[in-house]
Amino acid sequence: MCINHFQSQYTVNSLEFYFRGRVALFALLNGLNIEKEDEVALQAFTCVANPEAVKASGAVPVYVDIEPDGVNMDYRDLEQKITSKTRAIILQHTFGIPAKTDTLLSIAAKKNIPVIEDCCHTLTSQYQKKKVGTFGVGCYYSFEWGKPLVAGIGGALTVHDALLEKKVKEQYAAYKTPRIGRDIRIFIQYFAHKLLYRPRLFWPVRSLFHMLGKLGAAESNYHPIIAEGIASDFSLRMSLFSRNRLKKKYPLLQTITEHSKSVCSRYASEINSPAVSHISIPEKSVPVYCRYPLLAQNKKELLKQAKKQNIEIAEWYATPIHPLKGEELTLVNYRDGICPNAEKRCGQIITLPTHTKVRTADIDRTVEFLNGFSI
Ligand SMILES: *Cc1c(COP(=O)(O)O)cnc(C)c1O
């Protein structure tokens, strides 16, 4: 089942559509026959979605630190963390910045370990003239709030290995469509967000959604799967509502990509405050940012001022396995101090919006705010 609406300049031959990005990852891990006691290497400085899927597969998440000056996996630490039990490596292209893919792939190839690409932050970034998502045995996408293509909630995967493809397709037959109540909730949430949200209303809308999430009235990022065992969500297909939204929005991918590129070229050339620094990208890569990252000298104060002045600046990832903190981190096998670069980055990272609701006036205000911010 190759989906035709996924054909364009940016071809994505999606195999199947899942309830969330993490459900697509789970399907890939199952397709690779990952089992109890196996290890899956993934970077810290990620969201809880990834270790949730790894734990759901029965495997143990093993965290690899990020580069000392970047946001993606550090190949030196990957070499340290691979063991005889490592059965897969998840390669994340954080914020749309391609990971140092060739180096990481060659380490994996030497040990004969399959690589899965996490393309949740980008459908269109390129590395050495090839689109990310085409390097590993498979890759997965997410279509929830904050991702380049928002369709409510949902995920998809693509596969570049015949055997894996066969398995994934076979397994998909057993996946169920979510109940209609779920669809209605996603529908309401999608339109409420679409209607309410714009960069100037980022902070109040964020508070509202956090509150609704806590009350269980909105689909939130954190599912207490770890407490419940394998949550039933891991056997679900994409909701019908999200599927339809995705079909309608997919043709906009090129517009979204170009918009992000033009917004980010202004951020890159005009933000010159000593209070923040830009992140360098690997050679021969063309990032398409879902959010534009900066490292702040004084993140806490900067966010406080941004909130006061209603400037959209996000804080994620605020913890190595966002949004888990303190004791919660141990639920996904993260222990304080195992990935020092990731922990440091959490204290510095801020991100700016790149989506199509960002207008020239929003960029002006953001640049002015950051350049006027003193440490
Ligand atoms: C959003 C995201 C996912 C998947 O999220 P879902 O909520 O499961 O769709 C996976 N990895 C990263 C890095 C993400 O940001």
Image (cartoon, rainbow, N blue to C red):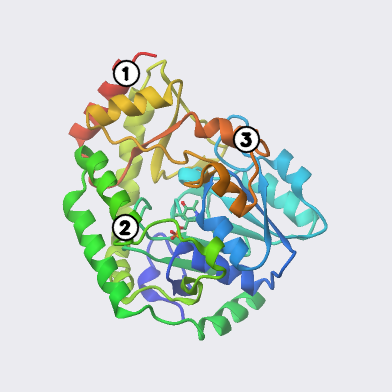
Kindly report the distance in space between the C-alpha atoms of the residues bearing marks 2 and 1. Answer: 38 Å
Using the image, determine if residue 267 lies above or below residue 182.
above
Residue 55: image x %, image y %?
A: 61, 62
| Mark 1 or mark 3, earlier in chain | 3
Residue type pointed to by label 1: Asn
Q: What's the residue at 66%, 47% (across, down)? A: 63
Q: Residue 169: give x, y in percent of width and height.
A: 55, 81
Quadrant assignment, res 78: top right
User: Looking at mark 3, is its residue's CB closer than 8 Å to ligand 1?
Assistant: no
Circle number at residue 67? 3
**Numbered disc 3: secondary structure:** loop
Residue at the disc numbered 2? 215
- Taking the spot 32% from the left edge, 27% from the top edge, the residue there is 304
In the rendered structure, the answer to whether residue 101 lies left or right of residue 350 reads right
| SS of the residue under disc 1 | helix
Q: Is 153 on the left-hand or right-hand side of 277?
A: left
For the question of whether residue 243 can be seen, the reply is: yes
Relative height, residue 143 to residue 373 (above, below): below
Q: Amino acid at mark 3?
A: Glu
101 and 42: which one is in front?
42
Type of amino acid under label 2:
Leu
Q: Is residue 94 above or below residue 9?
A: above
Q: How far across and how far down the image is residue 24, in percent?
A: 51, 68
Nearest-to-viewer mark from 2 and 3: 2
Choose between 28 and 251: the one closer to the eye.
28
* Quadrant showing the C terminus: top left
Per the image, label 2 sits on a secondary structure element best described as helix
- Residue that mark 1 sits on: 371
